[in-house]
Amino acid sequence: MLNNKVKVALVDSGIDINHDYLKGNIIGGISFECDNDYIIATDNYEDENGHGTSCASSIKREFDDVEIFVVKVLGKNGRTSRQIFEEALKYLLNMDIRLINLSLSVTTNEMIQDLHEICDELYRQGKIIVCSLANGFEESYPAVFNNVIGVKGFILESENSFWYNKDKRIQCIMDNNPYMNCNINNSYRLFGKCNSQSTAKLTGIIARILSKKHDITFEELNNELENLAVKNDWEDKDFLASKRYPDFKEGLYDKDNSILLGTANVVKEVLKLNKSDDDIYKYSLFNRKIGLNNDNCYEVLKKLEEKFDIKFDYLSISRYDFVSIQTLTDLVAKNILNS
């Protein structure tokens, strides 16, 4: 039987090795850290930050049969050193893993020649490096190297679409509407609107391509991605023209609707709002007056599951499901209907 599984090296903050959604996809890992100016390698690649776990689930969402080899370089604070980063990439020179996800970057151009040479050696081996542009930067490394696929996230006109041009310094613009993703402690959180998630999404898409075309070259892959993209050429003004906005679904449910009232009460309970407060019907749930954020969305979903005796498919839920009490009620109502 043809094995269509694809190995991915996830160079990040580690992974939640016991997460129900991910544990069947993990094939091993290593951790690099600095101890008294010495870089040491251990087999403790447990995630203390959550970033790597979230990126892993973004990859798996795009391609379920991914096999993840974890290379932990980021600590609890989400930071690393250039030396650790380079050592991790050198380690991958000796691994039979073709696809490398780097949802991280170096923002200074000091002493990047060594980093470029390591990436070049990986490229000559036929390895595919997918790397995020640093959030808020025009350039970062190794994303802008010509032997690396650079990725930037943006809310595009079409959800889950992407732009691709192999001749751009940053070749891919990926839609990055935040979705619920895996988090540490076998939990979930809203993760996205960042270049990290966009990079992981593209890695998943490439893994799916590799599962069907094992021997595809880097150049052929570039052509394939250009064919899959909705746009191959763009200017700065195109970002303004292509942006989409969420539908708040105002008035979809009457104020005396039992599902709406129940949903509102759960949100008020989790966010510790006054039960008589009507602001929840007037503002986006992410408004500071209301207090929803990426980290407490999961608690809201768990409480809604308890109240309505339903079970959500967390990974299919995006930020757009949370933007208003009406959109969240609609999510609940659809799950009640399907349960």
Image (cartoon, grey):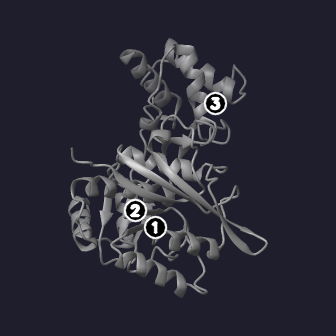
Q: Secondary structure at mark 3?
A: helix
Depth check, mark 2 against mark 3: the one in front is: 2
Pinpoint residue 229: horizontal percent, then vertical percent. Answer: 26, 60
Depth check, mark 1 against mark 3: the one in front is: 1
Depth check, mark 2 against mark 1: the one in front is: 2
Label 3 crowd (10 A; few <14 / some 14-19 / many >=20): some
For the N terminus, the image quarter is: top left
Q: Is residue 275 above or below residue 18?
A: above
Residue at x 39%, y 63% (from the top left corner): 96
Pinpoint residue 287: horizontal percent, then vertical percent. Answer: 62, 41
Residue at x 47%, y 84% (from the top left corner): 117
- Report whether 60 appears left or right of 288: left
Q: Which mark is residue 173?
A: none
Q: Which mark is residue 97?
A: 2
Pinpoint residue 195: horizontal percent, then vertical percent. Answer: 49, 61
Q: Nearer the viewer, residue 103 or 124?
A: 124
Q: Is residue 316 above or below residue 123?
A: above
Q: Which mark is residue 279?
A: 3
Q: Nearer the viewer, residue 237 or 336?
A: 336
Q: Amino acid at mark 2?
A: Ile
- Report whether 134 appears left or right of 217: right
Q: Is residue 215 visible?
A: yes
Q: Secondary structure at mark 2?
A: loop
Q: Amino acid at mark 1?
A: Cys
* Residue on which the image places disc 1: 131
Q: Earlier in the sequence, mark 1 or mark 3?
A: 1
